[in-house]
Image: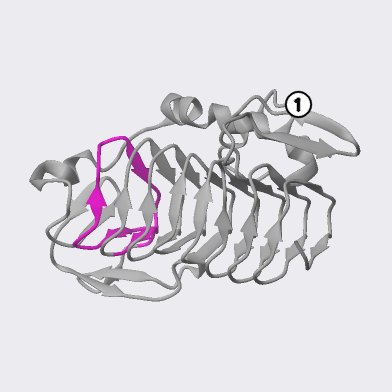
Amino acid sequence: MLTPDDLFDLTDFEHRELFNGCEYVWEALSKISGYIQSVLTPNITKLRITGDVLNKTYVLYQGEILDNGFELSPGDTAKGRFRVFKDGQELLGATVLYAGVCLFDDQISIGQGTVIEPGALIKGPTIIGKNTEVRQGAYIRGGCIVGDRCVVGHTTEMKTSVMLNDAKAGHFAYIGDSILGNNVNLGAGTKLANLKLIDSNISIKINGMIHDTGIRKFGAIMGDRVETGCNSVTNPGTILGKASMVYPCVSVKSGYYSSGSSIKHS
C-alpha cells in the first residue's frame, strides 16, 4: 500500500523512472532534483537573451522560435483546443509563451502544445510536459516535474513536486514537496503543507506502526483520481489512496488513507 505502484498507474508517465527502486513512495521526493538534472534538455535558453522576462509573445515550433507572423486561437490547452496558425496553416504541437512570462534560469524544458500565460514565473530545474497550461501568476519554484495535460493554476505555487498526467491545480493552490497522481484535481485554495511547526523529520503512523520518512519536508502524496474540495489543507506527511475525496475546508491529519476514502472531518 506504500509503493508507487499502489498509488499510481505509471504506464504512460514519461518520468516513471523517478520511482525506480522506491520501496516507499515518499522516497521519490528526495530524488526529484537529481532525476531532473539527469534527463533535462533545456529548450528555452535562446528566449532569455533579452532578459528573464519575455518582452513579447513567442511560439516554439519544430526547434524554431517564432516572434511574429502567427495567429493564436485560445482554447482548452489540455484538450488540444489551443491552436496556433501561420500563413493559414495550423502549427500542430506549437508551444506558446506569452509576453510577461519570467524564465528565471536556463534549466527549463517546456513540452509541445503547452501554453505559459503572462505573469507566470518558472525556476529550474523544471520539466513541463505536453499540452499543459501554466496560468497567469503561477509560481514554479524549481525541482518540479509537470506531466502532460496538466494545469498549474492562477497564483498556484509549486516546489520540489511532481504532477502526473492530467493532474490539475487550477486556482490558488500550494503544492510543496508533494506528488499528485494521474487525474488528481485540487479544489480552489487547497494547501499541501510540507513542514512541521516542530523541527523534526516527518513520521507517518500506519496501522499502528510509525514510519520515519527521514525527510523534513513532505507535503502530500495523492494517488490517481484523488479530489480535494475548496480550501482544504493536508498536514505534512499525508498519503491519500486512489480515488479518495477530501471535503471542502477540511484539515486532513497526517497519515495513510486507503483507496476510496471520504474525509469529511479533521
Other residues around mark 1 within 10 Å, as few (<14) / some (14–19) / many (≥20): few
Q: Is residue 178 above or below residue 88?
A: above
Residue 241 at x, y percent in the picture: 78, 51
- Magenta highlight on residue 102: yes
Q: Residue at (57%, 49%) from the top-left corner?
A: 193
Quadrant including the N terminus: top right
The secondary element bearing badge 1 is classed as loop
Say which of 119 and 250 sits in front.
Answer: 250
The kind of secondary structure the magenta stretch mainly shows is loop
Choose top left, top right, bottom left or bottom right for residue 98: bottom left
Q: Nearer the viewer, residue 142 or 206?
A: 206
Q: Is residue 185 left or right of residue 68?
A: right
Q: Position of residue 135 (x, y in %)?
A: 38, 64
Identify the residue at the far right of this view: 207
Which residue lies at the image location 71% right of the left edge and 56% below the top edge? 252
Q: Residue furthest left?
A: 50
Residue 212: image quadrant is top right
- Image position of 161 (left or right of 86): right
Q: Which residues are magenta?
A: 92-117
Q: Where is 203 relative to 229, above or below? A: above
Is residue 55 found inside the magenta-colored segment of the image? Answer: no
Measuring from the top left, give residue 3's x and y in whole percent. 77, 35
The residue beneath circle 1 is: 23
Residue flagged by tag 1: what amino acid is it?
Answer: Glu
Residue at (45%, 29%) from the top-left corner? 39
Could one spot residue 147 in this view of the protein? Answer: no
Please tell me whether residue 68 is drawn above or below residue 105 in the rendered image: below
Tell me: 59 left or right of 200. Answer: left
